[in-house]
Image: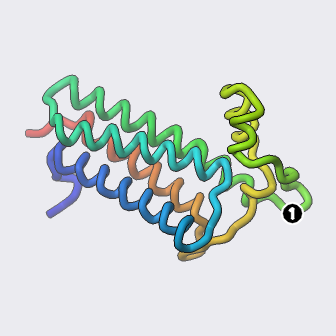
Amino acid sequence: MNPLDWSFRTAFAVAAAVAAALLGYAYWSQFVGGLEPCPLCIFQRVAFIAVFVVCLVAAIHAPRGIGRRVYGVLAFLAAAAGAGIASRHVWLQSLPADQVPACGPGLDYLMEAFPLAEAVRLAFTGSGECAEIDWVFLGLSMPAWTLVWFVLFAVGAVWFGFRRRA
């Protein structure tokens, strides 16, 4: 069966399952594989959680008409935010070694020492630890793969949220 022909409910259920699987792998990589997430990795996980929640609720609700568009927009926004974060991460990883920002404090320290808005701003500027590449699959780092997945989620959200079925 062609995935582009899936029903709204099926597409959003599959998207929720994929987001959950990607989150599961991220946590497995951290707790079993020993890969410590940098601040940008944490924010990408938050975006995946948002995609998962929106897609799960959309699949359970399976609305008609305008409701599909609302869920499509919400899923798109969550995926677009994740794509923006992942893009910044990939950019940091592509910098020459002499242009990589110095390593900064961890996210836990930032959250304790600064107001939330300032901590988030500082985390998004990235640091040297965000430029490290500890994992590669088919030539792409983990942030590059998350960027691919966020783009797929965003395109799928628009496709299934806004298409008209015969």
Q: Secondary structure at mark 1?
A: helix
Q: Residues within 10 Å of mark 1 (few under 14, many from 20)?
A: few
Quarter of the image with the C terminus is: top left
Quarter of the image with the N terminus is: bottom left
Which residue shows up at 59% across the image and 58% down it? 143
138 w.r.t. 166: above or below: below
Picture quadrant where residue 53 is located: top left
**In this figure, which colouring scheme has been used for the structure?**
rainbow
Q: Which residue is mark 1?
A: 97
Picture quadrant where residue 137 is located: bottom right
**Closer-to-camera residue (86/54):** 54
The residue lying furthest to the front in this view is 112
**Closer-to-camera residue (49/145):** 49
**Closer-to-camera residue (11/46):** 46
Residue 47 visible in the displayed image:
yes
Taking the image as shown, residue 59 lies to the left or right of residue 157, namely: left
